[in-house]
Image: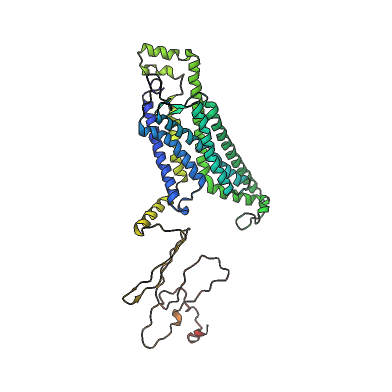
Amino acid sequence: MTNWIYPDSFNTMTIVANWVAAVSTICCVYLLASWAALPVDKTNRHYLSVCLTLGVMLMNLGFVVPLAAQPEQCYDTITPHSMSTSKVCGASGGLLLLGGWCGVVWAFLRSLSLHLQICWQVLVGRSFMVFAQVAGWGIPLIGIIPALVFSGVSFRFGSTCHINHKNSLVDLWIPLLLFAGATVILTFATFGYCVKVYLASLYDSSAPTEGSGLPAYTSSVRTVSPRQAYRRVKRVIALQWRGIAIVLIIIADVIFFSVIFVFQDNVVQSATRDPRVTEKWVTCLIRSSGNKNACLKYAGSIVVNEATVSVVLLLLGLNGVWIIFLMGRLSMITGWFELFGSLLCNGRKQKEFVSVDARVEDKKGSHHSRSYEMLSRDRSAVVSPLSSVRSPPPGRRTPEYFGRTARYHAPARSFSSPRPPQKATLDHQQTSVRLDSYENMNPLGMNKI
């Protein structure tokens, strides 16, 4: 098709699509490396996001492998290479099918997880994670077996191998469309429930309550007020909107890809069954001595037009770019800088939730005060070292009653964040609370307090 039916510019478009897929692969590798090396507070990683990114990367590799190998596409004058005659073709087509299956299945699992959390108030935990891992990788591995055995892949157009028409509707396209359709139904059912909860909250006449809006006990989770339910749904949507967006993008790409390829197969098969469909095109080729450019106007009726196929290939290659825009975070960049900085300065990675005591060094008889550094996950402030206690000058010592700090005693049930131990200081410039507001009090009697 590329050499005879499509114009020469189509070859350039397929190469561009492959390079776009290569950029998407780099984006996926960056995300996976960030999730593996950086702490959770920098990446907010989740196994559903990691596995979905892996699936998209596999699909992009189906375009990158032929780009790197530059395989010969034709077996002879009229026969293209297939998976049985070219290892590059088998690797390219297999990765494309496996990545497509993984993308669809993990998009379905992510949509199912969101639906259970929002609509049924189910707390997905370890059981769902085990189920997701088994289904997310098991179904694609099982799904590509009949596609490769009963249909196979070959160089149909471009430098990437695609599935052949024979039996492809049963062993690939229908199962993919079933999962994609189920994902669309779950997603729109979840959105419908969110709209219902929002409308119910508008007509809720109950007084607003303070707090998180969640019921106090698990047994009362189904008896929450509409306003409480709306606040809960709003929080979940705020946390998961990126995942929802990438799921919709991938499902839209897969459905578009499937419909176009099925239509392409049907058009080609109709020309095979009825040669009169290609009569004008073949006659033109004979008259022009094989000049395809003179006969392109007659080839439009037997293939999908160039613009549509080009859009399909570009959209498949852009999935990795969408993922890094929606699931990537600016904190990942700062996290890498901090990681490399800590490796260069300390020679080792710093752990999360640590309390580091500065070393006390005695140099030339001088004693340096101990400093405390508190590091926490939520970017808590670093407490500066406490100044050392200055020794009063020799001679008569007059107590500085107005320069002393008022000691604060924390309540017994205080829930404030932990603070390092503090020392009283006699330096009146370092004090935070002064007692000179008590104008009528006798300074000499202050020691009775």
Q: Quadrant of residue 345?
A: bottom left
Percent coordinates x, y for residue 268 in the rendering: 48, 20
Q: Tell how many labels.
A: 0
Residue 8 in the figure: left or right of residue 206? left
Q: Residue at 50% x, 48% y: name it.
A: 46
Picture coordinates of residue 394, whole percent (x, y) = 36, 86
Residue 281 place in picture, x, y as percent: 42, 15
**Which residue in the rendered view is the most extreme toward the left?**
364
- Note whether residue 106 is visible: no
Vertical placement of 413 versus 144: above or below? below
The answer, for residue 433, to whether it is visible in the render is yes
> Where is 17 relative to 298, above or below?
below
Out of 171 and 443, give the one closest to the viewer: 171
In the image, 199: left or right of 161?
Answer: right
Quarter occupied by the N terminus? top left
**Residue 447 versus residue 243 in the image, above or below:** below
